[in-house]
Image (cartoon, rainbow, N blue to C red):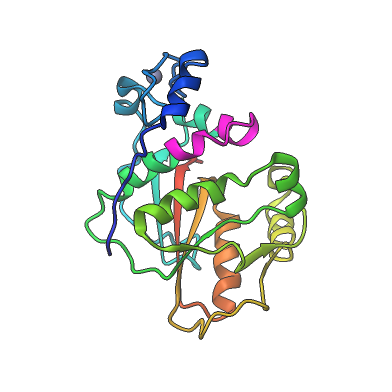
Amino acid sequence: MKSGIKENKPSFFEKLIRLIYPVKCMVCDTILSEDAALYICDPCKKSLPRYKGKIVKNMSLPYLDGIFAAFYYQDGIETAIHNMKFKNHPKLAKTIGILLCEELIKQETLPDIDYIVPIPMHPKKKRQRGYNQSELLARQAAQFLQKEVRTDILIKTKNTKSQSLLKREERLINLESAFEVNDDIAINNTYKKSILLVDDVLTTGTTINTCAKILKEDGFSFVYALVTAIAEK
Ligand SMILES: [Zn+2]
């Protein structure tokens, strides 16, 4: 599989803006130079809580053929992901996405995939937030893996309650009816096609496993997961 990371240096105009509004490290708030490609300083980058895992199969998430996580969901990366999601900082997705890909590149072999699919957000929620952070991360991964991002394959049809408020059985029922594979899309023969699902954080994994189940029921052969951080239970 061909791959490459482009850090995209800031444009001249972006640098001018940065002279007035300096960019800061997303972890420690240190002011960075105006040509910094990533919103993280070198010491913070070095000390990120790397998961150092391989692409593995997790028996409790049976519909996924392999999961890769770059970091533990703690310390600076937890703050950065939280700010990306809830504090209206979609710009951080580029830095977080590149950090994720830099860890992924360390894998000796990567599975062959056809499409990159972000975990969808309900359109109403996306309108409120203005963006789906998983989609932004997926776009970064797509550049790296040189594959197409498809936001039309898997759709969220129900604006679900926060999963953390529900019991396990309720969670599954809540989720299974919330996602759908879009029947209107033209994919020639889903049989043998493989998908890489992208999400920001894996906690119980119920959401991503449910999405994989739905995709497999619709004929996709392999479903892998790429997540920035894994929350230890
Ligand atoms: Zn820092």
Residue 92, how many percent across, how many down?
50, 33
Compared to 44, does 194 lie above or below? below
Residue 118, how many percent across, how many down?
55, 56
Instruction: Depth check: give the residue in front, 155 or 144.
Output: 144
Residue 21, how many percent across, how many down?
52, 16
Disc tally is: 0
Residue at horizontal 46%, vertical 20%?
16
Residue 50, magenta (yes or no): no
The magenta region covers: 82-95
Residue 86, magenta (yes or no): yes
Q: Can residue 23 be spotted in the picture?
A: no
Quarter containing ligand 1? top left
Residue at horizontal 38%, vertical 41%?
98
Q: Would residue 134 appear left or right of 19 to someone viewing this image?
A: right
Q: Can residue 26 be spotted in the picture?
A: yes
Residue at horizontal 39%, vertical 25%?
40
Compared to 176, does 189 lie above or below? below
Compared to 222, does 101 lie above or below? above
Instruction: Depth check: give the residue in front, 146 or 120.
Output: 146
Determine which quarter of the picture holds residue 36.
Answer: top left
Quarter of the image that includes the N terminus: bottom left
Instruction: Depth check: give the residue in front, 103 or 130.
Output: 130
Q: Most prominent secondary structure in the magenta stretch?
A: helix
Residue 70, how many percent across, how many down?
38, 43
